[in-house]
Image: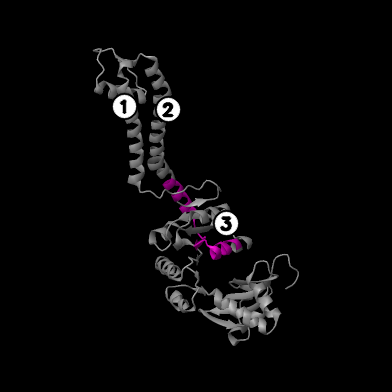
Amino acid sequence: MIRRGAPGTLTRRSQLPVWLSIGWRVVAVLSLLGIAIGVHWFDREGLRDNYDGQVSFVDVVYFTFISITTTGYGDIAPVTERARLFDALIVTPIRVFVVLLFIGTTYDFVLKRTWEKWRMARIQRDLTGHIVVAGFGKTGSEAVDELVARGRDATQIVVIDGDQDRLEQAEKLGCAVLLADATRDQTLMDVRVAAACSLIVAAGRDDTSILITLTARHLAPDLPISIIVKAEDNELPARAAGATTVINPVSFAGLLLASSCSGSHVADYMMDLASFDGRVQLSERRPAAHEIGQPLTGIQTGLGVRLYRDGRPFGFFDPEARSIRDGDILVEIVARRGVGGA
């Protein structure tokens, strides 16, 4: 079920099959009834049948059932102190326990599921323009932390993971969560991936991440998908699966290490750009109306470094960047809010 906010109220989905969960409850009720019937039978001298004066085994079964169900017609009654004490101290707790079992079963398999379906439908109805994060391990959780730090409303982030403990951490941040397999079509449809603004895939395994990407691309042809892969050989399959951005942390670390050989400040500035805590940030946006026709280097909101036109990148030094067109995507370096200079 998708959950939003309300930390500490997340329910743990039972690992038992439905039939087995119901089965053990039935066995528990029958066992308690068996104990009560057995004691009543061995102490049948303490019972009086006001109908025929004889207490048969059928009478014992009948008396036990009407006692536990609190019907109590009075045709059979305990008359000795021992029989009355047994009814008061043993049968009464059994009666309460059986009632609780029935109520719990009704709640789990009728009321709770009806409530969950209604609640899921209500949350799904409001999901649009959200970010879906498939995988809430170290990388996925850091991505969510960074999104929240950059001002993204946590209630507009949906986290999918198969680990309940991870989802509890995501819910504490205010995210909507879903305990499910993100490689399945139904899972991604449940989180309305087609209405999302982007998908972050960090499943922890390259093959799983690529399968999630392939599934999402099938359901949302135009959805921006960012995926992290560990092996360089999997970058091409990830792009072939439909990923728009493929990140290899090993390759990025290699770039930082190589840049540090040319000077420590180059690597420091690259880390600055990548982190929310840095003095500068990379920003991507559409051009404003008054910027159409201006050179990329002439924008006033930041330092224009690249523009994308028809899916092709052009640097500020390319001829195409001398005049911004409607439909271009601008990449600029901007100062972090509250910082006086970059």
Query: In terms of image quadrants, where is residue 108?
Result: top left
Q: Are there few (<14), some (14-19), or many (20+) residues within 10 Å of tag 3?
A: many
Earlier residue among tags 1 and 2: 1
Amino acid at pointer 2: Pro
Q: Which residue is mark 1?
A: 38
Query: In this orientation, which residue lies closer to the viewer: 20 or 10?
Result: 20
Query: In terms of image quadrants, where is residue 220?
Result: bottom left
Residue range of the region highlighted in magenta in the rendering? 116-145
Q: How is the image coloured?
A: one colour
Do the CB atoms of the residues marked 1 and 2 lie less than 8 Å apart?
no
Label 2 secondary element: helix
Q: Nearer the viewer, mark 3 or mark 1?
A: 1
User: On screen, 284 above or below 296?
Assistant: above
Give yes or no for residue 130 being in the magenta stretch.
yes
Mark 1 → mark 2, Cα distance in angstroms: 16 Å
Query: In this orientation, which residue lies closer to the viewer: 279 or 308?
Result: 279
Residue 299 in the figure: left or right of residue 209:
right
User: On screen, 249 above or below 102?
Assistant: below
Residue 311 in the figure: left or right of residue 306:
left
Do the CB atoms of the residues marked 3 and 1 lie less than 8 Å apart?
no
Query: In this orientation, which residue lies closer to the viewer: 233 or 154?
Result: 233
Earlier residue among tags 2 and 3: 2
Residue 309, given in percent of the width and then of the height, sits at: 54, 79
Give yes or no for residue 8 being in the magenta stretch.
no
Q: Main secondary structure of the magenta part?
A: helix
Amino acid at pointer 3: Ala
Residue 41, given in percent of the width and then of the height, sits at: 29, 23
Mark 3 → mark 1, Cα distance in angstroms: 58 Å
Q: Which residue is mark 2?
A: 93
Q: Which residue is mark 3?
A: 154
Residue 235, given in percent of the width and then of the height, sits at: 47, 77
Label 1 secondary element: helix
